[in-house]
Image: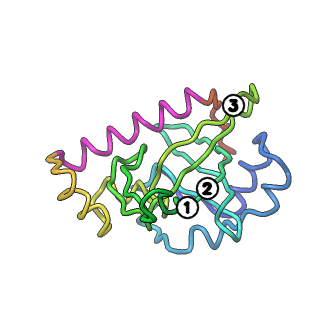
Amino acid sequence: MQKIDLQFFNQLLDESDIKQRIKRELRFNTSISHLKDSDWLELEMIHISNRSGNVGVLLLGLATSIYLIPYEFKKIGPSASTGRQQPIICDFCRTWQSGTRAGTITFTNVKSGKSNVTYLCCGDLRCSDHVRSKTSASKTSRTQLREDMDNENRIDRFNERLDRLVNDLEITPLTLPEE
């Protein structure tokens, strides 16, 4: 994905159909503060959230298109029967996450207003880093799942899942502003 600054992000928000309340609450600079210039080339997905982290937008850079998808995020709580947090496998990057680092992300089909779609996901939403084995969680996951895929195949699988998400939610790509 190309590097995105606040002005460019605001142009994308203006073009999107995202509710004004969500647009006002987003913390762009805080959400991307951990990224270096070189990191942008290896990103397919970035989450821009509000202060509490429970509402935001996913910024997807797929092929030559950019998508903004509003979401609601919830940490997974303890199981009612055992009292323990259950580990999950992220529906996007297929990384095994302990219950304390897992959550659910819910999307609403903006165009049709149809029912919500919920996915299990990494609590940090750093799936682009997990598929490239850049995090300790991804290294732990490789041993838990005994996965012998290389990073390129993981990246391809991740992109396919993001494409499927965009198609399922009927999201249209945003027009990139002229530079």
Q: Nearer the viewer, residue 7 or 119?
A: 119
Helix, strand or loop at mark 1: strand
Q: Which disc is residue 75 wearing?
A: 1
User: Principal SS element in the magenta part?
Assistant: helix
- The residue nearer to you, when weighing 40 against 135, is 135
- Residue drawn 69% across the image and 57% down it: 55
Residue 40 point in image, percent of width and height:
46, 60
Q: Which mark is residue 23?
A: none
Tell me if residue 33 comes above or below residue 53 in the rendering. Answer: below
Residue type marked 2 = Phe
Residue 121 place in picture, x, y as percent: 47, 52
Looking at marks 3 and 1 on the same chain, the residue that comes earlier in the sequence is marked by: 1
**Residue drawn where x is 53% and y is 62% of the image:** 77
- Is the C-beta separation of discs 1 and 2 under 8 Å? yes
Q: Are marks 3 and 1 in contact (CB under 8 Å)?
A: no
Distance in Å between CA atoms under marks 3 and 1: 21 Å
The magenta region covers: 149-168
The image quarter in which residue 138 lies: bottom left
Frontmost residue, 168 versus 40: 168
Q: Which residue is mark 2?
A: 73
In this image, 83 relative to 94: left or right? right
> How far apart, in angstroms, are the residues tagged by discs 2 and 3?
16 Å
Label 1 CA crowd tier, 10 Å (few <14, some 14–19, many 20+): some
N-term-proximal mark, 2 vs 3: 2
User: Which amino acid, mark 3?
Assistant: Ser
Q: In this image, 68 relative to 39: left or right?
A: right
- At label 1, the amino acid type is Lys
Q: Which residue is mark 3?
A: 115
Q: Is residue 131 left or right of residue 47?
A: left
Disc 3, SS: loop
**Residue 58: x and y, percent?**
59, 50
